[in-house]
Image: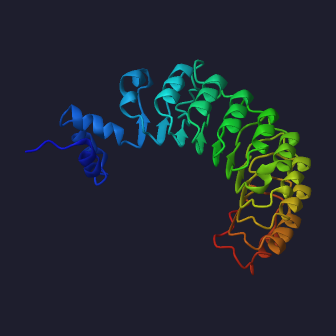
Amino acid sequence: MERFGDDVLGLILKWVDNPDDRRTFSEVCKQWCRVEGLHRSSLRIFEPILLPSFLPRFPNLVSLESSKGLTNNHIKIIAKTCPNIEVLNLNYKKTLGIIPILEDLDGSGISEIAIGCPNLAEVYLRRRCQVRNFGVTSLVNSAQNLTTLDLAGCSRIADEALKAIGNANSLLVLNLRGCWLITNGGLALLAIGSLSRTLRKLDIAECNRITDDGVLHLREMCCLEELNLANCGGNVTDIGGLAIAAIRTLKRLHLSWLINISDATLFALAQNCLNLVAIDLRGCISITFEGIHEFAKHVSLEFRIEH
């Protein structure tokens, strides 16, 4: 049988979607192993210590995922080897109360991959507690095509990082859940930049330094479709609720455990947010049936109100 060339093998691989079948393909011979690696677009890392030995086989990765502890050296290897990455999922998997190792990647590592992978569009860094303002600023300034940024649980992120994020011109999704250092000033920085004209989804749940003064700035976000303010504390009241109701583009709204949100907010939401399809009001103890009943004839609400 005539030996297949790399181009023919590449065409065959396009029809092989099952991971087990692709692994079997790569075990046929060295050529097939090499070709499979060249055509691999996504990879999940289970043993970071082995990165130098296996990653060079996959130079054309578009998506990379790892929930393990990673050092800055690991990140340098990724940035140097896989410059075409568009989706980088480094959400740390928290198990049994264990926090990320102290040697975990920090701002230097994030800066390396931001420069080395200029096509980054989606970056997930959840629970990477060594990631700070410098790394986020470098990432946002370098990744001009960034559409999704997940920093949930990155407890050292503060308003300084939000200044850079606010100037991003392509970001659609921003997750800052549990970034408790964020203040009203940070929300103001988000609202005055170009981000306010692009952002579709904002999660600032559990950011309990935020008050009505900060929520008022969110009115400037003219394209916002989903907002999560759950567990932001007692300093978000109907003053903030009425400001939210001025965001007429909203489709999904999470207000759970905002104990000082009352029927006044619901009246305004029902009247102004005609695109709203779902609202979460669990733990909002100041709300009564009268407020909920205001949505009885709402034109777009698809899901039941959670209360």
220 relative to 251, above or below: above
User: Can residue 230 be seen in this snapshot?
Assistant: yes
Identify the residue at horizontal 25%, vertical 51% (top origin): 12
Residue 143 vs residue 31: left or right? right
> Measured from the top left, where is residue 274 in percent x and y?
76, 74
Q: Position of residue 148 (x, y in %)?
A: 63, 47
Q: Is residue 96 left or right of residue 60?
A: right
Quick one: 206 or 165, which is closer to the camera?
165
The location of residue 276, given as percent across then percent down, is 72, 69
Is 70 left, or right, of 283 in this rendering? left
Q: Quadrant of residue 137?
A: top right
View extreme (left): residue: 1
- Report the side of 70 relative to 19 (left or right): right
Could you tell me how many numbered marks the image carries? Answer: 0
Quadrant of residue 242 within the rendered picture: bottom right
Q: Residue at x 53, y 19 (%)?
A: 73
